[in-house]
Amino acid sequence: MTPSQINTYMSDCTLCPRQCHADRADAQTGFCGQPAEISVARAALHFWEEPCISGSQGSGTVFFFGCSLRCIFCQNHTIAAGRGVHFITPERLGEIFLKLQEDHAANINLVTTGHFLPQVCRALEFAKAEGLSIPIVYNTGSYELPASLRLLEGLVDIWLPDLKYYSSQLSEAFSHASDYFTRATAAIAEMFRQAGPPEFDEATGMMRRGVIVRHLVLPGQVRDSKKILRYLHDTYGNDIYVSIMNQYTPLENTAQVPGLNRRVTEDEYKRVLDFAEKIGIENGFVQEGGTAEESFIPPFGSGVS
């Protein structure tokens, strides 16, 4: 990815389904809230991903400012709706990847990267030419376009997408995206095309390639969760992994929102897990108590310069 190509994408930005056409190359901000310059909120070893991603070494996780979704319950809302004060070049981002590898990260984990895709492609190309060899994880809310994801062909090894909602009413109410399910499932299909079935390191159990779809169970939405699990199993069988999460945490901004002002009950979560077992999902991850805590939200704010 050349600087000229990056400028072309940024000068009339249509990277995500919002199609906002912002001239981010001229300091305009897109729906994502970001200009063209990369801003990183945090880059560090992260130990709270799925076991085959974090392992014992930690995942080299890079959190980017901005997001093309507007999830009202977002645990990372301070960066998703924020804007960094330090901006870095793609080459500097590549150096950060290399430093995380030096720190023995199991992989490089790119969190909410879609609005910086061309710049991240250049950073990955630079870092790989300089010796970056650990797997690359693309961690996303899945409100993405397949055409944009194709820019990452050959650069990403592991895809870690969300599938948040089946219902368009829920996705509109909670993420301002009535077309979420259609967009997300098309994006996941592209991810699976690139990754194929899962591959693991036999010695360590760490994932080397594949797709893990995350689904966060929301309070009162067991039926929607079941529809998502049914779709994933009918579409991919056991060629993907499914991570069923119970960590929904009501924060200050959702304290007064009906349906989002409480945690998921043990019974709700159990009903979702029982359904997954009933329909034959074999490859997956579940969470056990203690995950729905604010303390599990990474400490943002230090940034990277």
Image (tube, rainbow, N blue to C red):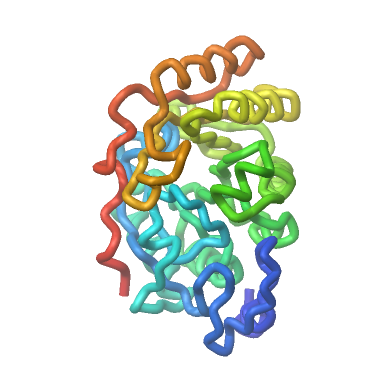
Q: 100 or 29: which is nearer to us?
A: 29
The reply to whether residue 287 is visible in this rendering is yes
Q: 35 or 96: which is nearer to us?
A: 35
Q: Position of residue 222 (x, y in %)?
A: 55, 24
Quadrant the C terminus occupies: bottom left
The reply to whether residue 104 is visible in this rendering is no
Residue found 71% across the figure and 29% down from its top: 231
Q: 35 or 59: which is nearer to us?
A: 35
Q: Position of residue 122 (x, y in %)?
A: 56, 71
Q: Position of residue 128 (x, y in %)?
A: 51, 62
Quadrant the N terminus occupies: bottom right
Q: Quadrant of residue 7?
A: bottom right
Residue found 70% across the figure and 69% down from its top: 19
Q: 107 or 77: which is nearer to us?
A: 77
Q: Is residue 207 above or below residue 34?
A: above
Question: In this image, 221 relative to 280: left or right?
Answer: left
Residue found 51% across the figure and 61% down from its top: 67
Q: How many marks?
A: 0
Residue found 43% across the figure and 38% down from its top: 53
Question: In this image, 214 relative to 295: left or right?
Answer: right
Q: Position of residue 17 (x, y in %)?
A: 69, 61
Q: Quadrant of residue 80?
A: bottom left
**Farthest residue toward the bottom?**
26
